[in-house]
Amino acid sequence: MTKIKSINSNQLYIAHNAEVSLKLAGNTAQVTFTAGKNRKCPIKNLSKDEFVDLSTGEVKERQHSENRFQRKNAKDD
């Protein structure tokens, strides 16, 4: 759950390169800002079974599931 906090506008600093959005609802204004969007994918597919982690250069093997409802940590009975 997100915490909502009211602050004094004099205490707020938004960086020059931040992406800012403003939503107005009656007499309430909601300002959200982020440092930016992630525009690069951290992995690159090599095949259907392998991928490379671009941050480390490490080649890893994919873990496939039988169906989309199968949990990663599910144990066979």
Image (cartoon, grey):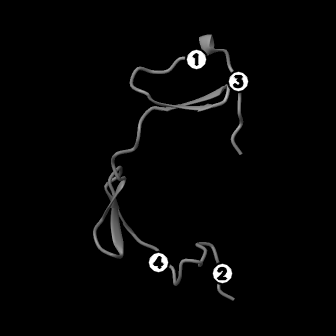
Residue highlighted by disc 3:
6
Give the residue at x 45% y 32%: 35
Residue mark closest to the camera, 4 vs 3: 3
Quadrant the N terminus occupies: top right
Mark toward the start of the polypeptide (4 vs 3): 3
> Does 50 sit left or right of 10 as displayed?
left
Give the residue at x 59% y 78%: 70
Residue mark closest to the camera, 1 vs 2: 1
> Badge 2: few (under 14), some or many (20 or more) residues near its Cα, within 10 Å?
few
Mark toward the start of the polypeptide (4 vs 2): 4
Residue highlighted by disc 1:
12
User: In the displayed image of the protein, which residue is found farthest to the bottom?
Assistant: 77
Q: CA distance from mark 1 to mark 2?
A: 49 Å
Q: Which mark is residue 54?
A: none
Secondary structure beneath dot 2 equals: loop
Q: Which mark is residue 64?
A: 4
Tell me: residue 30, above or below residue 69: above
Q: Nearer the viewer, residue 65 or 17?
A: 17
Residue 19 quadrant: top left
Residue highlighted by disc 2:
75
> Badge 1: few (under 14), some or many (20 or more) residues near its Cα, within 10 Å?
few
Give the residue at x 40% y 20%: 16
